[in-house]
Image (cartoon, rainbow, N blue to C red):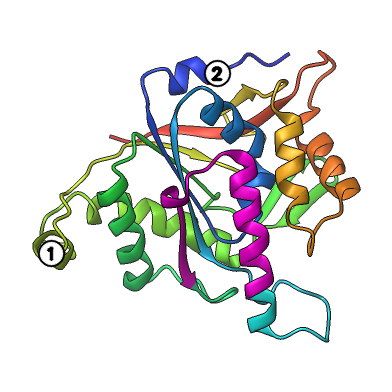
Amino acid sequence: MYKDSYNEIFQNKQRILVVFSHPDDAEIYAGATLSRLITSGKEVCIVKMSLGNKGSRQENISEHELASLRLEEDRTAMKSLGIKDENNIYLDFSDGSIDNSLKTIEAIAKVIRKFKPDIILTHNPEHMIIRWAEGTNWINHRDHRNTGMSVLDAAYPYSRDTLFFPEQLNNEGLTPHIVSEFLFVDYYDHPDTVAIDVTQNVDERTKAIACHSSQYSMEHAKESTDFFTKIDDSGKRYERFRYVVAD
């Protein structure tokens, strides 16, 4: 039996920054939690590092066509979740090419300095292989790993210290920002794992996933929601994260 950690984590927070590599990552890994946050009146900003412009097994579609299609789908999904247009950000890195580089860190640091989040939600930056349960594992996408590492680097020390990317401060009027709380997806058996009760929000999660119709049918969206949120016999639904306070 899991306990709901929503109030423990979010009660004193208003601004939540979400940084993921591709369209649909937010919905797959945290869609119901994001729905609960937005319904509760929290300000949620979602960053997509790339448009997933290579994420297709079709041979008859170009990268440009796929990027345009996935952008349209993602905007529909964000509206479904209730994300404001100004809080829906695309950083335009190429799918499969996200590096833990200064260019990547700079782009994320700029968002942090502008949005000034109380907590950041992002990918697991550590593990090459994600372990869900005995016999159920998957590869942690290279873009995911590098996004997670870059988010941590951007939060400390690059968005905090004034001599990193000073043009953001001098030319764009941004100010340094400190954030020390993080939620990471794709941790399922870590001592820091927490659960968020999303029983009332799973339908919104499924609808948002299904907006990405080039990737998921409604049936597949429901299967994803069931797989990730049915984790005990209580009848409740949960999404799980690793929660870290890093002063």
Q: Are marks 1 and 2 in contact (CB under 8 Å)?
A: no
Q: Amino acid at mark 2?
A: Ser
User: Residue 180 location in percent, x, y?
Assistant: 32, 37
Instruction: Name the front one of labels 1 and 2.
Output: 1
Q: Main secondary structure of the magenta part?
A: helix
Badge 1 crowding class, 10 Å Cα cut-off, few under 14, some 14 to 19, many 20 or more, is some
Q: Which mark is residue 166?
A: 1
Amino acid beneath label 1: Pro
The residue at which mark 2 appears reads as 5
Residue 54, compared with residue 223, is above or below; it is: below
Residue 122 vs 92, above or below: the answer is above
- What label does residue 38 carry, if any? none
Q: For residue 153, what is the image quadrant?
A: bottom left
Q: Is 127 drawn above or below residue 170 in the view shown?
A: above
Q: Position of residue 19 (x, y in %)?
A: 48, 51
Q: Is residue 87 magenta?
A: yes
Q: Is residue 16 magenta?
A: no
How far from the left and from the top, in percent, is residue 241? 58, 34
Report the magenta residues as a range. Answer: 68-92
Closer to the chain start, of discs 1 and 2, is: 2
Q: Secondary structure at mark 1?
A: helix
Mark yes or no: residue 186 visible: no
**Quick check: 47 above or below 241?**
below
Mark 2 residue element: loop
Residue at the image point whose x is 79% and y is 59% from the top:
213
Residue at the image point whose x is 65% and y is 43% from the top: 80
